[in-house]
Image: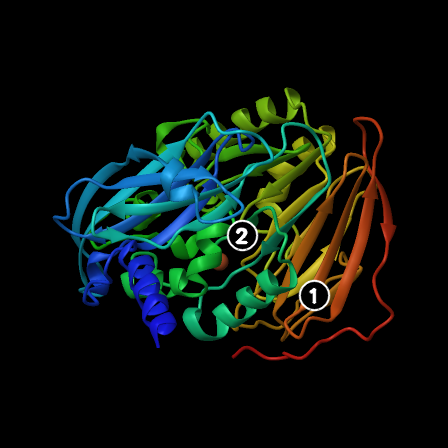
């Protein structure tokens, strides 16, 4: 009896050491928490979240991950930049929220950190995230195409599949059309809801698609969804302020990833010139052996009735001349992979969401598919890129590797499985 009383006292003491759990008030807690890569991913990471309007200052607390629960005691607190936003979407939603962004700098390379965001009384859960190594070193990242429709449910299932099957993904690339109606805030809520913990723990980069752009009534030009720069904290090293967080570059352990704003390239001649001039610079002065371009529109289309002729005319000579290795696109709601020119990049079109188009009459891909949801694991080592595409049931659908020991064009080895091509969508739906 005495023993159990003592035990009960000890237990209640240890419980008292933790803060009481307040009544549930979900809207006051940070939401839409995301970690993005920076231009120096070995020593810095970028974070973004939002909270109920009028909550005041927001903070991030971070510390190196410890073997046990010591990290809250060693955590360092930094104030975030707060942007109070209030706007009405085209679908008549009233968006009123405080958006917070902060960058952690001076981090140690190749190190596990924990962090939480919010403020006193309204903290997120502690999340874990890792910095890149300072040098070229093997790692794997994910690339997915358009999520766009039925985001929380069917899109989310496929994205979660990709993350589950790649638990060690260093980061994740989204090739645009993350959502369907640019400024629809419910859709953005669904996007973050696909996998809130993993989106807060796996750094990501996203490039905008045409569905992140809109032309509000009376506007003369396409406008990026207001949420894009509010809710992401993407690198700001592109050609102009106008293209900030849509055109940028990240070097990660020997791989240079470049995001181009395909919609603006298509819509606006000045933007196209700015992006091209900037791209030349990024490809000329490039310390990385591997170069990957992420852009929404494909240079080589896969969907019926589509062609990327104009983009091809402008971009392909530049990509060939600089031996770009991979061009990752979305937009066509089909799958295709091929290398139309021996010395040029391998082009991929992919689609992770449920919307499906029929394939065009095309001969450039060596592997193609329709009516399938696909995600790609890209394994990078200093001398080799191995790309594997999986269907949503987790089966290998396509694979190849690129080998390179110098700075020239890579040698391609086809590794596609002997399984039949899946052409499951023959008509528009
Ligand atoms: Fe698109």
Residue 390's label in the rendered image is: 1
**Neighbour tally class for label 2: few under 14, some 14-19, many 20 plus, Cα within 10 Å:** many
Position of residue 417 in the picture relative to residue 213 (left or right): right
Q: Residue at x 20, y 52 (%)?
A: 121
Q: Position of residue 211 (x, y in %)?
A: 41, 57
Position of residue 323 in the picture relative to residue 220 (left or right): right
Contact flag, marks 1 and 2 (Cβ < 8 Å): no
Position of residue 168 in the picture relative to residue 121 (left or right): right
Q: Nearer the viewer, residue 139 or 311?
A: 139
In the picture of the structure, the residue carrying the numbered disc 2 is 175
**Neighbour tally class for label 1: few under 14, some 14-19, many 20 plus, Cα within 10 Å:** many
Q: Secondary structure at mark 1?
A: strand
Q: Is residue 267 visible?
A: no
Q: Secondary structure at mark 2?
A: loop
What separation in Å lies between label 1 and label 2 (alpha carbons)?
A: 16 Å
Q: Which is nearer the N-term, disc 1 or disc 2?
A: 2
- Quadrant of res 48: top left
Report whether the residue tagged 2 is closer than 8 Å to ligand 1: no
Q: Position of residue 80 (x, y in %)?
A: 28, 36
Q: Residue at x 66, y 69 (%)?
A: 359
Position of residue 6 in the picture relative to residue 367 (left or right): left
- Quadrant of res 58: top left
Q: Residue at x 48, y 51 (%)?
A: 201
Query: Relative to residue 138, is residue 332 depicted above or below?
Result: below
Q: Position of residue 123 (x, y in %)?
A: 28, 51
Quadrant for the N terminus in the image? bottom left
């Amino acid at each position: 009896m005495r023993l159990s009383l003592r035990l009960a006292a000890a237990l209640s003491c240890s419980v008292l050491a933790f803060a009481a759990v307040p009544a549930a008030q979900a809207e006051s807690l940070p939401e839409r928490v995301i970690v993005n890569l920076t231009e120096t991913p070995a020593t810095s990471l970028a974070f973004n979240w939002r909270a109920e309007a009028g909550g005041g200052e927001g903070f991030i607390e971070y510390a190196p991950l410890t073997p046990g629960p010591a990290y809250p005691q060693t955590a360092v607190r930094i104030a975030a930049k707060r942007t109070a936003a209030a706007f009405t979407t085209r679908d008549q939603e009233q968006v009123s929220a405080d958006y917070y962004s902060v960058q952690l700098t001076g981090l140690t390379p190749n190190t596990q950190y924990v962090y939480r965001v919010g403020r006193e009384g309204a903290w997120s859960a502690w999340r874990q995230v890792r910095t890149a190594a300072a040098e070229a070193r093997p790692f794997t990242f994910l690339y997915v195409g358009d999520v766009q429709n039925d985001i929380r449910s069917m899109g989310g299932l496929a994205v979660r599949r990709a993350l589950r099957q790649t638990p060690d993904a260093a980061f994740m690339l989204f090739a645009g059309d993350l959502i369907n109606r640019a400024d629809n805030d419910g859709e953005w809520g669904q996007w973050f809801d696909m996998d809130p913990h993993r989106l807060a723990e796996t750094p990501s980069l996203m490039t905008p698609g045409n569905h992140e752009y809109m032309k509000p009534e009376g506007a003369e030009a396409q406008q990026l969804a207001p949420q894009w720069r509010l809710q992401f904290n993407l690198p700001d090293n592109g050609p102009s302020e106008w293209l900030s967080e849509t055109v940028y570059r990240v070097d990660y352990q020997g791989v240079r990833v470049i995001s181009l704003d395909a919609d603006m390239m298509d819509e606006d001649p000045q933007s196209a010139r700015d992006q091209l001039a900037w791209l030349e610079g990024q490809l000329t002065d490039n310390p990385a052996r591997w170069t990957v371009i992420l852009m929404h529109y494909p240079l080589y289309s896969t969907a019926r009735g589509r062609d990327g002729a104009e983009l091809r005319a402008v971009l392909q000579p530049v990509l060939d001349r600089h031996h770009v290795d991979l061009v990752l696109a979305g937009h066509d709601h089909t799958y295709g992979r091929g290398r139309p020119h021996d010395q040029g990049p391998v082009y991929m079109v992919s689609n992770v969401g449920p919307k499906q188009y029929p394939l065009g009459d095309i001969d450039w891909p060596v592997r193609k598919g329709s009516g399938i949801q696909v995600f790609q694991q890209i394994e990078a080592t200093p001398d080799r890129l191995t790309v594997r595409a999986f269907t949503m049931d987790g089966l290998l659908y396509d694979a190849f590797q690129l080998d390179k020991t110098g700075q020239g064009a890579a040698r391609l080895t086809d590794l596609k499985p002997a399984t039949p091509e899946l052409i499951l969508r023959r008509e528009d739906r």
